[in-house]
Structures are given as C-alpha cells and as structure tokens.
Image (cartoon, rainbow, N blue to C red):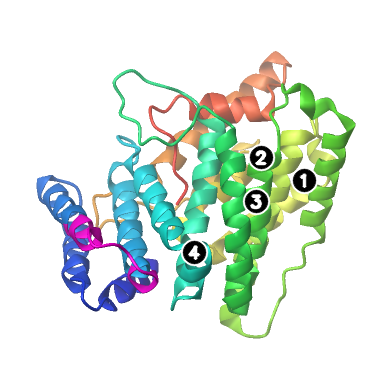
Amino acid sequence: MVISRLYVLLYRGSHLDYPQLSMIFSIIYRHGPGMRGEELKLSAIRALAASASQGIESQSAIQHVAAVMVLCLFESQQNSTASDQWLCYLRAAGKVIESVSLESFGRATDGPILLEWVYYHEVMARFSLRHWRQHHPGVSSCQYDTDSPSYLAAERARWNSATTLIQWQGSIVHNTIFAPLRLLSRVVSEVLPSGDPNSRKEAYKTKVAHLKQEIRNLEIPTPADPAIQSVAARAEVFRITTLVYLSRSTDHGLSRSSGLELLVDKGLSLMKYVGCCERPLPLLILGCEARTDIERLRVLDLVPAPDSRSPWRRHHFMTLLLPALWIQNDLDVESNVKLDYTEKLSAVFNASEFPPQFH
C-alpha cells in the first residue's frame, strides 16, 4: 500500500522524468538483491541527481522525497543487516524537505502524508540509534551522528513543526495513528539513560511522570467505520508500546504484577491489526516481556513469516533480537541480578554490526 502510494506520487511529476524513475523502482522490487538491482538503484540515483541539478520547488520536492523513500525501503529490505545506507536515504528525504521549508512542503498536495511517512521512519531510526552506539572499523557511515545525543534534540524542533502541519491537514485516520507516534518520539528524545546523573533530579522525574500520564490519558477513538477501527487498534498498540517502554526505562525494579502484564496482553491481542512493516518495534517491546515458553511462542507466532515470493529480508532483526533479549531475561533470573532495561536493549543492539531497523 505504501509503495503503491509512493509510485502514484512519482507519476505526478511534470517536467521531470518521474515515470521512468518509478519504472526503475518497480524493476528493483521485482529483481530484489543482486547486481541487476544495484545497477538499477544507481540509475535511479543518477536520475534523481540530474533532475535536482536545476533546483527543487515545493511540488517537485514531493516526488523527490517519494523517490528517496522508495530507495530507503529498498535498501532496508535488501541490505539492512549489511549496510546502514537506508539511514542515508532517510536523512536525504529530510534534507529535501528542509530545502523547500516544512511549511511549503506540508501545504503541497500529498505533503502531509509524505511528512507522516518520513516522520514514522525518523522515529524508528531514532529508537534504534538511541540504543545502538557501536562503531566497527571499516564500516562506512552514512553520517548520522550516532555518537551525540544532540541528534535526538536537534531533530525535535523540526518534527514539532511537522506535527502541526500533519495534524492541521491530515484526516482523522492520519491523526489517530500520529498521536501515539508523536508521544513515542518524545519518549525516545527526552528519556535519559539510567546512568545519567540528571535522571535522578526531581525536575526530570516530574517531567517523566507528566509524560507517562499523558500517554495513559491518550484516548484512541473507536469509530463505527471498520477501516478506521483498524487504524484505532494500531494506534492503541503503539500507545501501549510507548507506555511499556517508558515504564521499563524509568521504573527500575518494576514488577510484572503492576498492571504491565494486562497492557502487554492487550497489545499482543491487537497485533493482528498492525501491518507487517509496522510490527517490529511493538513486537520487540511487548515480546521482551514474555517470560514463559508459552508466552514466547505466542510472540513468535506474530512475527510475519518470510515472504516466499521475495528473497529479501523480512524482519530478520526480529528473529535475532527477541531470542537474545529472552536469554538476557533468563540470565537475570538465574543470577538473581537484574540488568538495567535500557542497558540490556543497548547490549543486544550493539551485537549487530549495523543499527537494527524497525520498518
């Protein structure tokens, strides 16, 4: 569905050769990994560079961002465990939006929809980079500033403006799913590691308490329209995911009997409404809470099976991260020493050569 919408945006180009670009992207998706796919990807990049050589205006920026996001999806689906280039394309999409200003981009046709899609990927990337800080010799970097926490704060102002534009122009469907996503973005940006001295200050504890209350009080509408009901269920899954993650990250020694189990059970029950591409992060956070074999089998049943029609990676990171987290949980029980929640996530993420991706 997302790819189809991006292709429609590409075909709306006027003086630029976007139909040719969308054809290249279609062939890339059909060919999958391999030399032919890489050659076509390079052709698409050259075509984008040529079309941008005379400058980018608001409407043409829509097609440029759509094209770059298709490249981002292609890279993340094909090479996510062997490259971090998907981050480069995501950053490029943000730069194109900045080049024409958020306001003009958001007021162009389909601008809010694309802003929301780029924003979603930005939040997923921020979550991954929050816990992945490893540097490996010889690994090329896409220049995402993964060392500096300032990256998280620096992006916040830009996406606060994007939030206003999306909620101003977006339909009820988009606003429903965007509300918990905005809160997840704030949690990822504002919650400090447990070892940070500032995390013990009263002002910070008060801020966390207010943020937690805001997540608890977020009301997800349940309209009669079945299509919007599905969107509402997805939004509720992300709200629950955000609350569980915030609680675990800030309430050290939190007991499973404190109501968290009910939240996790509800989130997993609603997971059937969440699309395959949106499942990884909720499944990771909620699945990490599974302690028994039965609970873990329930989670694994929700991990989408590999697509037999495509050799591309399908949730490869999920099959690595979840078992690794469960092993850490089991070791905690055996040793009677509880590893800090954020440190545990970071340790598992850093076992990967490249930052995990959750889209």
Q: On the image, numbered disc 3 is attached to which residue? A: 184
Disc 3 or disc 1, which is closer to the eye?
A: 3
Task: Determine whether label 1 and label 2 are within 8 Å by CB.
Answer: yes
Q: The N terminus lies in which quarter of the figure?
A: bottom left
Look at the image and give the residue range highlighted in magenta. 47-60
Above or below, 23 relative to 120: below
Q: Is residue 273 visible?
A: yes
- Mark toward the start of the polypeptide (2 vs 3): 3
Q: CA distance from mark 4 to mark 2?
A: 32 Å
Helix, strand, or loop for circle 2? loop
Q: Amino acid at mark 1?
A: Leu
Q: Amino acid at mark 3?
A: Leu
- The residue that mark 4 highlights is 115
Q: Mark 4 is on which residue type?
A: Leu
Q: Residues within 10 Å of mark 3 (few under 14, many from 20)?
A: many
Label 2 sits on residue? 289
